[in-house]
Image (cartoon, helix red, strand yellow):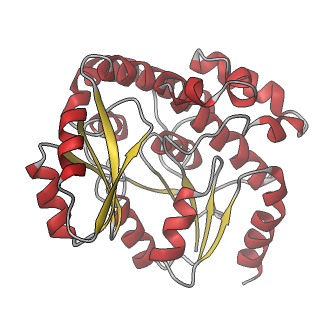
Amino acid sequence: MLAIVCPGQGSQTPGFLAPWLELPGMTDRLGELSEAAGVDLNLHGTTSDADTIRDTAIAQPLIVAASLLTFEAVLDGREAPGLVDVTAGHSVGELAAAAVAGVLSGPQAVTLVGARARAMADAAAQVATGMSAVVGGDASEVSAAIEAAGAYAANVNAAGQVVAAGTHEALEALAAAPPARARVIPLQVAGAFHTPFMEPALEPFAAATAGVEVAPATVRWLSDLDGEDFPADALARLVQQVVAPVRWDLVTGSLRDLGVTRLIELAPAGVLTGLARRSLPGVETVAVKTPDDLAAAHKLIADKESA
């Protein structure tokens, strides 16, 4: 079985889209997605600096657009149904995964991402908050320490990899009293995503989804809320995910249970394949970071087709 996974915020780096725009048609395609998102993705994917693309309103559409462009390059003219068995996205990557699954078109996905990003950026501006990675430690002790500090477990990525979110004071308290055998590492993000601090984003994002027509999934699409198939009211789930924790550990468990043997991470890739190598031993992985990685992705697909 082949899985396609889509990364979330924080995976972007300055200039990462530049080599992709050397491929035929990519500049025009990115222009279409820029118009849909209301963001100059060409500028931000090629020349903007790290501080600029850290802005939530820019980072989210940039990441999703990159995943969509690289997905087209990975398919290389093929159709996803029958080739891709399952897809999932980490946080904002769920919008890219919706397009992989055929639920949304590419322009629909980036239009919604643009609205999501602006709503979350506005919510983050209301209270000074942030996020910190908690690496290592016993799961129950990590959870207890995060709660004791007044923070939230916003991402549970894998055993020993949790992201805490909250006010700067709460995160400082967590760093001052970390769980045993764990490190607390501040992250360069603009707010406490996937926590109640994002509640102001719910209404404007929900309004943006009103009237959007979705198609039935043609590829199995897993939710990072619980690792299960997306419900029929997929857009409502996507809205609620703004304030709900990302449970990538449960997604990984579902991929294991489904019998996934091959996994491709779309650009800007690296984080999710790294988690897969630790949590899904024996699964072949390809992180599509630049066009140079397409050959490995195409070989993995060819191996699946010939198996």
* x, y percent for residue 252: 41, 68
Q: Nearer the viewer, residue 204 or 164?
A: 164
51, above or below 134, in the image: above
Q: Is residue 10 left or right of residue 233?
A: right
Q: Quadrant of residue 22?
A: top right
Which quadrant holds the N terminus? Answer: bottom right
- In screen coordinates, is 271 left or right of 221? right
Please name whichever residue, 12 or 32, is drawn nearer the observer in this view of the structure. 12
Q: Nearer the viewer, residue 196 or 116?
A: 196
Q: Quadrant of residue 273?
A: bottom right
Residue 13 is situated, as x and y percent measured from the top left of the image, at 64, 40
- Does residue 130 sit above or below 72 in this rendering? above
Residue 193, visible in the rendered structure: no
Q: Residue at x 59, y 14 (%)?
A: 38
Q: Can residue 253 be seen here?
A: yes
Is residue 275 left or right of 75 when viewed as pictured? left
Q: Which residue is situated farthest in the front direction here?
A: 176
Horizontal and vertical percent position of residue 293: 79, 59
Q: Which residue in the rendered view is the most extreme toward the left?
A: 148
Residue positioned 83% across, 41% down in the render: 19
Q: Is residue 63 left or right of residue 154?
A: right
User: What is the number of callouts on the image?
Assistant: 0
**Is 93 above or below relative to 180?**
above
Q: Nearer the viewer, residue 75 or 283?
A: 283
- The residue positioned 19% from the left and 46% from the top of the image is 152
Quadrant where the C terminus sits is bottom right
Residue at (17% x, 52% y) in the render = 146
Residue 292 falls in which quadrant of the image?
bottom right
